[in-house]
């Protein structure tokens, strides 16, 4: 092995070991990560990957959100008093940039470290600055959620609104993530006497993929803001079909035979513009305005 290759290997090993000590990763079986390699470290919920990007003339080419001053909405906590997630997440991959050309960095990936500098407890501005000052070769340690052990299947649930409305609460959406790294809309409560409770199929934890009625047709909910999801559900007709994703083991009724192709929202973050989103759970049976929004900043780190 030449001295240059040996030095490069030592630098990569040092980077992995340094960050591993911060996140308690087992890297014994993944000393180096090259293009296309997949690490075996992490845990049952998360997997980790080192991605080296060459900045080049087109820049890094991705946008981020998060940080200690703009935390995401964490899962597993009640509708009120949710725990904040200060992690830094990728919100957009920009065509023509280094990230798009490399192909490994994905929207919703959490950036754990940049060139050995951890980003688990930094402000949004500090994360942006770390990426800008990383040099031409930028080594990202990213983590992402593993695929669910029980594959999700889509089911259609038709509800007829009664005097108590649809009768369920939701959380999630862009900037208000109910599950860190996931912009999905999730059911957090089913109200007694509402259409959902009477029907019996919609459950807490179900993911709302789309909603359909006879007037507006089908509206996708996979990558929308919390407010957009609430508005869509509140303005449906009396008879509405919910397209719901849930594990096979959680649903005994036959799955819908209809094919479904998600159509993602085009409302992605752009440039250095800040976007405003609320951080709350909404009861779609009620008709009150959302709580006071808080600012969630996104940054384009294409350069």
Image (spheres, rainbow, N blue to C red):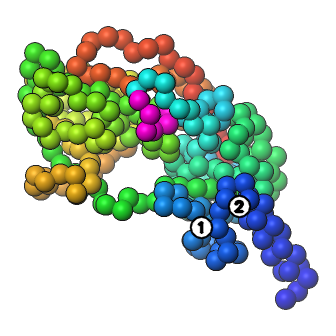
Relative to 63, is 176 above or below? above
Q: Along the horizontal axis of the image, is 164 left or right of 264? A: left
Q: Give x and y (percent) for residue 138.
A: 75, 57
Q: Is residue 232 visible?
A: no
Give yes or no for contact between labels 1 and 2 (Cβ–Cβ under 8 Å): yes
Span of residues in magenta: 73-78
Query: Which label's residue is closer to the chain start, 1 or 2?
Result: 2
**Quarter of the rendering occupied by the C terminus:** top right
**Can residue 129 be seen here?**
yes
Which of 84 and 92 lies nearest the eye of the viewer?
84
Q: Residue at x 86, y 80 (%)?
A: 6
Judging by the rendered image, the residue that carries numbered circle 1 is 41
Write the residue at 22% across / 57% down.
Answer: 249
Residue 5's spot in the image, x, y percent?
Answer: 84, 80
Q: Who's the residue at 18% across and 55% down the image?
A: 259
Measured from the top left, where is residue 124 in percent x and y? 68, 34
**Left or right of 220: which side holds 184?**
right
């Amino acid at each position: 092995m030449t001295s240059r290759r040996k030095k490069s290997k030592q630098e990569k090993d040092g980077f992995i070991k340094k960050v591993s000590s911060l996140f308690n990763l087992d890297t014994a079986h993944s000393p180096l990560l090259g293009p296309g390699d997949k690490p075996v470290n992490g845990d049952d919920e998360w997997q980790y990957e080192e991605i080296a990007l060459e900045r080049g003339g087109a820049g890094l080419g991705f946008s981020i959100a998060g940080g200690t001053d703009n935390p995401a909405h964490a899962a597993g906590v009640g509708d009120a008093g949710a725990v904040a997630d200060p992690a830094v997440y990728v919100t957009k991959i920009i065509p023509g940039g280094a990230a798009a050309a490399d192909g490994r960095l994905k929207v919703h990936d959490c950036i754990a470290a940049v060139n050995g500098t951890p980003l688990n407890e930094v402000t949004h501005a500090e994360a942006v600055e770390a990426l800008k000052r990383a040099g031409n070769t930028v080594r990202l340690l990213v983590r992402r959620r593993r695929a669910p052990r029980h594959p999700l299947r889509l089911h259609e649930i038709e509800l007829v609104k009664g005097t108590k409305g649809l009768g369920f609460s939701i959380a999630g959406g862009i900037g208000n993530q109910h599950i860190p790294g996931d912009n999905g809309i999730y059911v957090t409560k089913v109200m007694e006497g509402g259409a959902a409770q009477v029907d019996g199929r919609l459950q807490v934890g179900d993911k709302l993929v789309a909603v359909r009625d006879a007037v507006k047709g089908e509206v996708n909910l996979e990558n929308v803001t919390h407010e957009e999801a609430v508005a869509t559900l509140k303005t449906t007709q009396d008879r509405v079909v919910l397209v719901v994703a849930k594990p096979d083991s959680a649903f005994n009724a036959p799955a819908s035979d209809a094919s479904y192709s998600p159509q993602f929202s085009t409302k992605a973050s752009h440039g250095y513009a800040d976007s405003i989103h609320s951080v709350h759970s909404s009861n779609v049976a009620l008709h009150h305005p959302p709580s006071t929004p808080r600012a969630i900043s996104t940054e384009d780190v294409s350069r």
